[in-house]
Amino acid sequence: MRRSLRFAWMFAALLALAILAAGCGSKSSDNSSSGSSGSSSSGNTAASSSKSYDNGSSAKGGVYRVGWEQSFGFTNNFDPTGEYLGNAWGLYVNLLLRPLIGYKHQPGAAGNELIGDLATAVPQPADNGLTYTYKLRKGIKFAPPVNRAITSKDVAYAMNRLANPKDGGQYAFYYTVIKGWDDVANGKAKTVSGISTPDNQTIVFHLTKPTGDFNLRMSMPATAPIPPEVGACFEGKPGDYGRNVIASGPYMVQGSTGTFSSCSALKPFSGYDGANGNHIILVRNPNYDQSTDQYRKSNPDRFEYRVNSNADDIYAKVQAGQLEDEQASPQPKTIRQYSTDPNLKDKLLPNVGDRTWYLTMNMTQPPFDDIHVRKAMNYIIDKQSLRKAWGGPVIGSIARHIAPPVMYQNGLAEYDPYSTPNDSGDATKAAAEMKQSKYDPDKAGKCTMSQCKSVLMVADTRALDNRMVPVIQANAAKIGITFKVRSINGAYTTIQTTNKNVPFSERPGWGKDYADPYTFFGELFDSRALIPSGNTNYSLAGITPQINTEKKLGVTGNLNNVPSVNADIDKCIAKTGDARTTCWENVDKKVMTQVVPWVPYLWSNNVTIVGPKVTHWNYDQFSDGTAYSQVSVKSS
């Protein structure tokens, strides 16, 4: 998942870990969930539970206010066709939009269980897995200014908009399995031939091959209905629809009033400040029918999200009851305060996230075009020190392979192909790999050639990055690799541009798009997903000279014999159930031992602090953040 979710940088590790060991007081509940596990000797003791919060009875009414540390530009200015940020997804699926398939907005395994949302049920495929038919619920209407019943044609329009690259879809690759999708993407057709709407309550998808997770793909926000009369106003203008998102859920953007008459009469809604990114204000959708929606509780009358770049100020306002929630990074003093004050510690809520943080190596650039160098890096990196830079065990588990074990129903929990004592690195094992490398002709256990000197490392400018970089430099120097560090504010843009030919970066992290391992492998390692900008296959797995030319990637380096897992991915896509899980486990093992594009080091948690006016808070496993559809607040 390209979706960069907010994970708090936890610094007071021992204090915070004590909270997890002792519990969070009588007002918070601790529910076990399938988190990752590991050897206790290595201190791999990430929270394997989910935290919710209760402080009184849930009731309708009040305002739920959230302090937001970063602007609301997101990745596509809040246009759901292209928006790919997890925080935005949390607003969509909890409050604004109703895709065909949805979730219960709960933590843990229950939060990843599929339900019918706009659809009446989760359908079973027909025609040997090639046909999916969805029946729409009756009584669901668009918010003002559209004010009409949602039909299957509105879902079809949203899908056709997603297929058209001119409208900015950032994860359209998930839907290329629909017949005729590529014809729209290539400009050969205006509508996807594999989507049909036999009546207003039915939509049918015809696939080119069995796709075991297709229902999961239909839970993503870009698939939610869009009224064509409004969407047409923004054709070929990626991001512009974000200022006029028409709600199908229980809330709408403030200013969504009146009746739609024409594009020229449609003005940006006042509740979304897309130009300056200062606020999002959501109010109740008067056309919403609670009887059609079993799982969204929709308690507050209003949600206010306001940007404040001062994280300390955000947390002060949370504690003072001027805010109910936050999307910010706490300082050590904040964690220490909530760790030790008995009146506050039940408001510190850690939950297991479905995300891997990793060091990425570009397999076309020296010295990482040699698999033995890449394996040596896995052995030499001190993962414990990297986790300590984040804040210690409370922030998560030591990562030992690609997808967190929770993605395999806790399978591969003990799989550790580059085991080192206490996860702190092993110079002997690293040297043994280096001796097999072409960059160690003297078999000294270190790289002795110029290709290993002053290798470009792109880092970000966060305090966290500044703590991580020296650890990586000191570790790599043990096997003869030195780095020239280039620190960039917002490093993702650079490492996602293929013609920059970045050999190494410490910035990346990836969380699921939905609860299936494919979301870790499809875009991260499938060469068919390579693109010149916005690329997330940083290691360039599967690239060939032909792909480089055809896609105009601008990659220079060693393009011969870069390992590929395309065929392995294709085998897993068609499977279901336990066979699918096992298939993905085998891909994970192959990537870690035969491709070796990463040094995974952390499976992280998500931590939230809530204010005194909150009466109920819950975690949404799908969006890896606050389940806004479940919260409640004192109305006075």
Image (cartoon, rainbow, N blue to C red):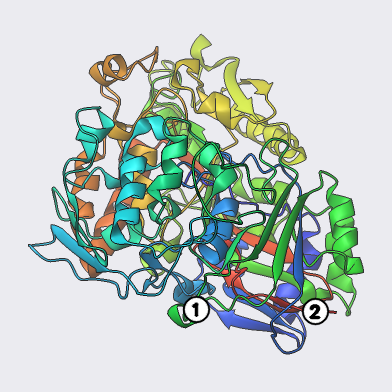
Q: The residue under label 2 is which amino acid type? A: Ser
Residue 327 visible at all: no
117 or 520, nearer to the observer: 117
In the picture as drawn, the residue positioned furthest to the front comes out as: 261
Residue at 47 percent of width and 61 percent of height: 142
Name the spot of residue 266 as percent of width and height, x first: 56, 42
Q: Is mark 2 on a helix, strand or loop?
A: loop
Residue 132 falls left or right of residue 59? left
Q: How would you rate the neighbour count of disc 2 (Cα within 10 Å): few for under 14, some for 14-19, many for 20 or more?
A: some
Residue 101 visible at all: yes
Rendered image: mark on residue 295: 1
- The residues tagged by marks 2 and 1 sit, at their Cα atoms, a distance apart of 22 Å
Q: In which quarter of the image is residue 186?
A: top left
Name the spot of residue 271 as percent of width and height, x first: 69, 51
Dot 2 or dot 1: first in sequence order is: 1
Q: Is residue 374 above or below residue 632?
A: above
159 or 423, nearer to the observer: 159
Q: What element carries label 1?
A: loop
Residue at 28 percent of width and 46 percent of height: 175
Q: The residue under label 1 is which amino acid type? A: Tyr
Q: Is residue 433 above or below residue 50?
A: above
Q: Mark 2 points at which residue?
A: 635
